[in-house]
Structure formats: structure tokens, C-alpha cells
Amino acid sequence: MNEPTWRDVEVVMTTFSNDDFTRASTWALRRFYPELRIIYADGHPVSSFKPDQPNTQVVWIPGACTEDCRNAAVALVGSPFTLLCDNDCKVIGPDAIPLCLEAFTEYPKCAASGWYGL
């Protein structure tokens, strides 16, 4: 496998029905990765979130738990790598995704990277 880039990643973002946080987190990602595909996972009984940007999708399962919503969203990912993040995650630099992907290049048997540590 070639060294992965951010273009090999799709995002599954849990929204928790908090539109302001979701928009801020989306802006932070799109600031450095404007074409990144984002799939929003929402289980809130009444969802008002409507993404207004291209390359986005919403999985809304009213009343479902976070894990079920996230799993349904991950089923729609078509890229080799999935970035799972909550809507309180803010990317603050262009190296965020490449640094997470670096572990997969250095350690081919690696199954996960990140989790607030990178």
C-alpha cells in the first residue's frame, strides 16, 4: 500500500444534536481539508442539523444510541480509513490527519491511531 494521505480518509462525526459545535468542528476540518467527506451520525429524537456543504451526508436514527448511529454511518464509508470524531473535536493544524495516518505507515499491523493522544 502506498503511504496514505488525507484523501484516503472519510470522517464520521457524532453530532449529539448540537448544531453550533457541529458547524465549528466541520469548519475546523474543512479549513485544512476542504474536500474531505463527512458523514454525520445523529440519534437525537428531533434533529435540526442540515449540512449546507457538498460532500456531506447525515445518518439520522431518532432515539438510537451513539454507537448504533456511528456504526450505521461507518457502513457508508468508502475510503480505506475512517476518522471517528465527536463534534467537540477541533483540528488546529494541517498535520492532524497525516500524523494519525503515519502510524499505519510505520506499523502496518496497527488497527487504530489517535484518540486525543496525537
Image (spheres, grey):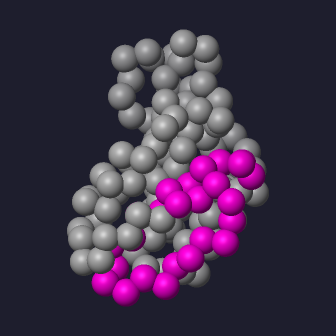
The foreground one among 48 and 91 is: 48
Please report the bounds of the magenta region as a residue range: 33-57
Could you tell me residue 57's position as x and y percent?
53, 60
| 4 lies above or below 17 | above
> Looking at this view, is 33 or 60 the one in front?
60
Q: Residue 29: x percent and y percent?
A: 66, 56
Describe residue 44's horizontal placement relative to residue 82 as left or right: left
* Residue 43 on the magenta span: yes
Above/below status of 16 relative to 100: below
Where 20 falls versus 75 (above or below)? below
Whole-percent x and y of residue 16? 40, 75
Nearer to me, 116 or 79: 79
Q: Main secondary structure of the magenta part?
A: loop
Residue drawn at 45 percent across, 17 percent down:
107
* Nearer to me, 23 or 78: 78
Residue 18 appearing in the image: yes
Q: In the rendered image, which quarter contains the N terminus?
A: top right
Q: Is residue 29 above or below residue 49?
A: above
Query: Which residue does the image show at 42% across and 82% down from the upper left?
Result: 47
Q: Say which residue appears at 37% left-offset and 17% top-offset.
A: 109
Is residue 117 visible in the rendered image? The answer is: no
Query: What is the x, y in percent for residue 89?
Result: 53, 61
Tally the marks: 0
Tell me if 74 is positioned left or right of 91 in this view.
Answer: left
Q: Is residue 60 magenta?
A: no
